[in-house]
Amino acid sequence: MTGRIHVDFDAGEGALLRMVGLVERRGFAVSGVSMAAADGRGSLSLDVEPRDGGRRLEVIAAQLRRLQDVRNVSIFPCEPGDL
């Protein structure tokens, strides 16, 4: 399912690389990125598309929540072409 993933995180060393890398390794292509950071905290929005029909946003959100610096993950499913 195509959608947007929004992550609030502590801007620690390597945090961004871990999050984007996990999304890519778990079978999603990142088609858009938006990020803001201030005072040691960050906010990341990723527009993603699954590489095959078996990928679910809920699963990748649960995996992101387990990362060390992640505080919150929200998903926003979209129809293809809406992003």
Image (spheres, rainbow, N blue to C red):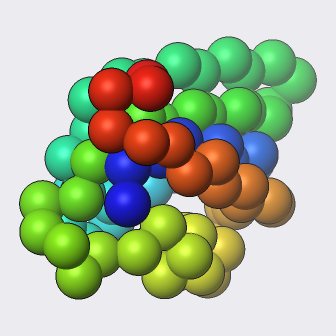
Res 10 seen here: yes
Relative vertical location of residue 76 with respect to residue 62 in this rendering, above or below: above
Q: Is residue 8 left or right of residue 17?
A: right
**Which quarter of the picture shows residue 56?**
bottom left
Residue toward you, 83 or 74: 83
Q: Position of residue 69 (x, y in %)?
A: 67, 61
Q: Quadrant of the N terminus?
A: bottom left
Residue toward you, 69 or 77: 77
Task: Residue at 12% x, 60% y: name it.
Answer: 51
Residue toward you, 15 or 1: 1
Res 17 seen here: no
Q: Position of residue 46 (x, y in %)?
A: 47, 36
Task: Residue at 75% x, 46% y: name it.
Answer: 8
Q: Quadrant of the C terminus?
A: top left
Q: Position of residue 14 (x, y in %)?
A: 44, 48
Total number of numbered labels?
0
Residue at the far left in the pictured view: 51
Task: Residue at 20% x, 47% y: name it.
Answer: 29
